[in-house]
Image: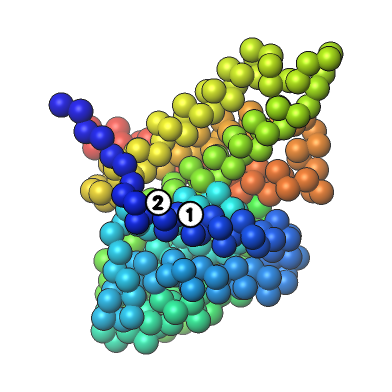
Amino acid sequence: MTVEFALDEQQRDFAASIDAALGAADLPGAVRAWSGGDVAPGRKVWEQLADLGVTALAVPEKFDGVDAHPVDLVVALERLGRWCVPGPVAESIAVAPVLLATDDQGERSAALASGELIATVALPPHAPRAVDAGTAGLVLLATDDGVTEAAPGELHESVDPSRRLFDLTPTGATWHADVKRAYEFGALATAAQLVGAAEALRDAAVDYAKQRSQFGRVIGSYQAIKHKLANVHIAIELARPLVYGAALTLAPRDVSAAKAAASEAGLLAARAALQTLGAIGFTQEHDLSLWLLRVQALRSAWGDPEAHRRRVLEAL
């Protein structure tokens, strides 16, 4: 029996609307500004996401959210990865709504949905530090004992300068939430972003290979380049259904399989893009460098590939 999965027309239109909005924005400029401490251009991008309903996807309807299916969340986050949106994307859009889905946190949930509030989360041991805790409007620390507000402590530099990582110190009362489910959402959301980022890197490499000439021929005509980029395409197309399948089940084994596959697709795409463009692709002036660094950062976020492969093996 063969099971086929395809997005419906509404989901494809939703993805296209996100692409249209983010494609018209200067995302590389926003990422560079965010890296330099100026979050204003990035916040304008988040305002666009709120207008599209992206920030409300995982928020319950009773708190003015959409309460969308996780598949719809994956549709959006894949596109956000494609455009390298700065900020705590997985944490604010996918994880925080789960941790705030209680009646006494309804006001904050509504603020998440409207885009007025951007939250970040640490969930040790797999997400021990919070991204952008220095600028987020709400900082949460989630453990097996529950969830609490927290204050940012020591700053740790990430391989991606637009992702500042902070140790956290709990500062408030603890409330109970489905922390295990929140972790699955964090890993799934990160996997979706990796698929989108891998797609962006593949497309950049393909476009360059069609234009760059060497020894009188465009480099895309060489079999070595063709095979390298074909392998990237295959890796993406193998990872994507695992991500959507995990969104359907949210089973830990499925989420980990998706995160591991998406991480490897991202790494393969990054290597192929860098090898195709050469050293110019890794200079700070070239936009490709932003995606290269983002992939490296997301591979270890919400559980590195080794941890997720181990979880898959333990579930067999």
Residue 145 visible within the image: no
At 30% from the left and 64% from the top, the residue drawn is: 68
Q: Quadrant of residue 64?
A: bottom left
At 76% from the left and 29% from the top, the residue drawn is: 211
Residue 5 visible within the image: yes
What scheme was used to colour the molecule? rainbow
Question: In the current view of this chain or complex, which residue is farthest to the right?
Answer: 215
Label disc, if present, on residue 12 of the rendered structure: 2
Q: Quadrant of the C terminus?
A: top left
Q: Amino acid at mark 1?
A: Ala
Label disc, if present, on residue 16 of the rendered structure: 1
x%, y% of residue 77? Answer: 46, 55
* In this rendering, position of residue 109 left or right of residue 138: left
Q: From the viewer's side, name the closer residue of 128 and 35.
A: 35
Query: Dot 1: few (<14), some (14–19), or many (≥20) neighbours within 10 Å?
Result: some
* In this rendering, position of residue 16 left or right of residue 272: left
Tell me, yes or no, whether the two marked residues, 2 and 1, touch with CB atoms within 8 Å.
yes
Q: Amino acid at mark 2?
A: Arg
Q: From the viewer's side, name the closer residue of 38 and 167.
A: 38
* In this rendering, position of residue 219 left or right of residue 237: right
The total of numbered circles placed on residues is: 2
Q: Quadrant of the N terminus?
A: top left
Q: Is residue 151 above or below residue 202?
A: below
Provide the secondary structure element on which disc 1 rests. helix
x%, y% of residue 56? Answer: 39, 71
Q: Quadrant of residue 185?
A: bottom left
* In this rendering, position of residue 11 left or right of residue 21: left
Q: From the viewer's side, name the closer residue of 156 and 213.
A: 213
x%, y% of residue 192? Answer: 44, 48
